[in-house]
Amino acid sequence: MAERSTFGDDAEGASAGGRRTPGEDALLAAGSGIERLRRYRSLLEAAGPKSERLEALDAAIRLLTRAIAGMSDTDESVAAYRHNLSLALQSRYDECRELSDLERAAETLLLGLANPASAGRYSALLRYNVGVVLRRIHRVTRDRGLLTVAEAELAPVLDYVQTEHVDPLDCQYEYGRIVLALAESSADADVPMDKAVSVFARLVNEADPDLPDYPAYLDSLGSAHLNRFDRRGERADVDAAVEFAGRAVGAERERGAWSTAALANFGAALRARGVLQAGESEDLDEAVCWTREALALADSASERAGVLSNLRAWW
């Protein structure tokens, strides 16, 4: 789930003087583009002016695009630069919310994967990132076909061992989110829902509980069980949803951090079990308490709208 390194060292080696070759120009453009991307991240961490952040991103996108155009398709460095370009485009989407930035990020990654000779050792990284980008586009467009492509691209990475550029736990998590989204968007979701539960269960069992992302793994497993309960109504699933959602909230609190999503998901799981028991437990009261906490914590209009939507649906 964390962003991978940006491979800036290939920018070295261009001629120090005289007329440069197209390849040397491309390397210089790539190195400069990566430096602009690093500047953007520094500005973002320091809460720098948006105008300066966008200036750095636009320069990074322009330079990396020029570098890719100036290099041979068989050069492995091109795959690294495509990765960096996709990160810059995703960051620009975060700043401006222009869907075309995500669409361009997906296009550059898929073009890299279409040429196995250039993808090389970066193949797993490109596959992981294309899954991330396509799922982000799906959140906006609700085009289920994007999730199908994302699942197909990411599935081969699941059996990879740790590599220099991609963490298999990140791949499992992203694959599980894609499969869960596929299941949620289908009327006949039994098989993909089982797959989502299986992927997240494997992740929770294999990952170190001290990892920063472990609460997200627990929360996702709880969500998968709750979604399967909504489809099948089996008590074991709602009990598991409450267990893992509760563990996610507890793990977040141990780290001194709380998320609206985890609190809201715990509230939803408690409510589902409370309704199943016809109000013969304290689950419904606890559901209200946790959901109110989620509402108080929400720091954006979209988060508040989501929690309020849950509350209105309950009563």
Image (cartoon, rainbow, N blue to C red):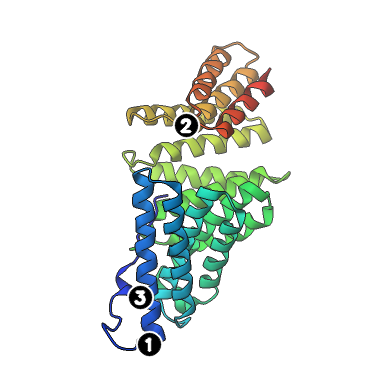
The amino acid beneath tag 2 is: Phe
Image location (x, y in percent) of residue 181: 61, 46
| Marked residue nearer the N-terminal end (3 or 2) | 3
* Disc 3 secondary structure class: helix
Image location (x, y in percent) of residue 112: 51, 72
Mark whose residue sits in front, 1 or 2: 1
Q: Quadrant of the C terminus?
A: top right
Residue 50 sits above or below residue 273 on the image: below
> Who is closer to the viewer here, 181 or 312?
312
Image location (x, y in percent) of residue 179: 58, 49
Rounded to the nearest angstrom, the CA distance separating label 3 from label 2 is: 49 Å
Q: Which residue is mark 3?
A: 28
* Disc 1 secondary structure class: loop
Q: Which residue is mark 2?
A: 244
Is residue 293 at least partly visible in the picture? yes
Rounded to the nearest angstrom, the CA distance separating label 1 from label 2 is: 57 Å
At 40% across and 78% down in the image, what residue appears? 26
Q: Which residue is mark 1?
A: 21
The amino acid beneath tag 1 is: Thr
